[in-house]
Amino acid sequence: MSAVGTVNRRHILKGNSAESLAFRVQLAKNMRFAMGRIGMAWTELAEQVGCSRERAQHFSTAESCPNAIELVLIGRVLGVSLDELTKGCVES
């Protein structure tokens, strides 16, 4: 992957663009669905991932996006792959 591709992906995750918002909204939706499937609360997810309850709640409202390590941990805790978590196939 070129450096340009890396920079563009970072911009999508951290920026306030429509792409960034769409990604965060889809991620939040997938997280809520996966959590509901196993009956997990945001406080429990935060505890298992090692972040604050407030940070986890920001994921749920698409105010912020988990970092790469948090995404991996969230996927493991919820029993879903990163593709399912980020690309919208959790409900399938």
Image (cartoon, rainbow, N blue to C red):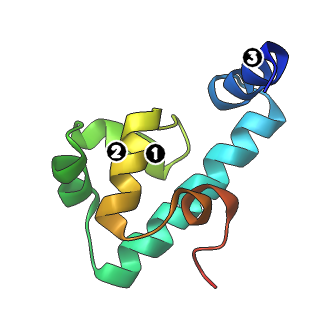
> Which numbered disc, 3 or 1, marks the residue closer to the eye?
3
Identify the residue shown where x is 50% and y is 64%: 81
Residues at discs 2 and 1 in contact (Cβ within 8 Å) = yes
Mark 1: few/some/many CA within 10 Å (<14, 14-19, 20+): many
- Quadrant where the N terminus sits is top right
- Disc 2 designates what residue? 56
Residue for badge 3: 7
Work out which quarter of the rendered image holds the C terminus and state it.
Answer: bottom right
Mark 3 → mark 1, Cα distance in angstroms: 22 Å
Answer with mark 3 or mark 2, whichever residue precedes in sequence. Answer: 3
Query: For the residue carrying disc 2, how many other residues have a C-alpha within 10 Å: few (<14), some (14-19), or many (20+)?
Result: many
Q: Earlier in the sequence, mark 3 or mark 1?
A: 3
Name the residue at 18% across, 59% down: 44
In the image, what residue type sits under mark 1?
Answer: Phe
- Viewer-nearest of labels 3 and 2? 3
Secondary structure under tag 1 reads helix
The residue depicted at 69 percent of the width and 46 percent of the height is 23
Instruction: Please provide percent x and percent y for residue 58.
Output: 43, 40
